[in-house]
Amino acid sequence: MKIYSTRRRPHRPARIVLEELGKRYPGAPGYAMDGISLDIAAGEFVCVVGASGCGKSTLLRILAGFETASRGAVAVGDEPIAGPGPDRGVVFQDYGLFPWLTVAENVAYGPKQAGMTRDDIREITDRCLDTVGLGRVRDSFPHQLSGGMQQRVAIARVLANRPAVLLMDEPFGALDALTRTGMQAELARIHRDSGVTVVFVTHSVEEAVYLSDRVVVMAGGAAHGSAGHVREVIGIDLPREREVTAPEFNAYKRRIDALIHEGERSAA
């Protein structure tokens, strides 16, 4: 199923390039994050993992345009990031839905603000709700839904804006284990169908190995006495239908876990 209206094309999935990116907060003795260089291909799914305080969320906020880098350069689709933009959709752990709007009205909000026609708004809303399996609750309000369903609405609302890049900061962190597993499979399918570029921050190594084309392992941070930095980038050479109990899957988990723990020890 196509997610987007045939009359209103989405932004093309975009390449993301970061060059020696650094962030220093006013009054801080040093950089919270520094020397981050990454080249993320258009349509790639990249997870960022690491110990608390290493700069994962700071990196995502810079990509979203919510914060500015102190040095270095960052571009999406060859355009420098100057602030938030419709080419980048952001999903947080907090669903951020409008409680006074129905599910369908939440999803339609972005297209309405963009001045789309009523027919296009209806089409893209229907398609995005179908994509996340929530067409049957379109007239419900957020408080009537489970946490997993609310997060699916949040994803549908972002997809309705036709982003080139999807930025996700611990989006499944507040969900129970069973719902989280289901949402991971749902997101993998959405990525496959939409082709959108995804940068996904998580504390779960298993989640990162399950979802990613590549995993960016970060280390350091103020709590460890050094700037957050990229320790290693690991390509996940597994078929997309991934079995979490497979030996190859768990070999990646052990390797990434070891890198995170080694980074904590070396920074201590």
Image (cartoon, helix red, strand yellow):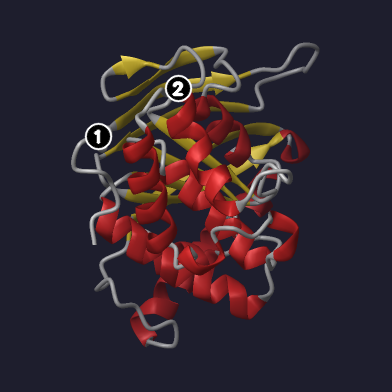
Total number of numbered discs in the rendering = 2
- Residue drawn 32% across the image and 38% down it: 120
Q: Secondary structure at mark 2?
A: loop
Q: Is residue 43 left or right of residue 156?
A: left
Of all residues, the one furthest to the right in this rendering is 27
Whole-percent x, y for residue 54 in the image: 64, 41
Q: What crowding class fits label 2: few (fewer than 14 Cα within 10 Å), some (14-19), or many (20 or more)? A: few
13 in relation to 117, above or below: below
Q: Secondary structure at mark 1?
A: loop
Whole-percent x, y for residue 47 in the image: 45, 52
In the depicted view, which residue is nearer to us: 31 or 96? Answer: 96
Whole-percent x, y for residue 23 in the image: 60, 20
Q: Which residue is mark 1?
A: 8
Please name the amino acid that badge 1 sits on: Arg
Q: Is residue 182 left or right of residue 101?
A: left
41 in relation to 244, above or below: above
- Residue drawn 78% across the image and 17% down it: 28
- Residue drawn 45% across the image and 15% down it: 72
Please name the amino acid that badge 2 sits on: Gly
Q: Which residue is mark 2?
A: 85
Quadrant of the rendered structure where residue 219 is? top right
In the depicted view, which residue is nearer to us: 91 or 70? Answer: 91
Whole-percent x, y for residue 1 in the image: 24, 62
Mark 1 vs 2, N-terminal side: 1
* Real-space CA distance between mark 1 and mark 2, rounded to the nearest whole angstrom: 18 Å
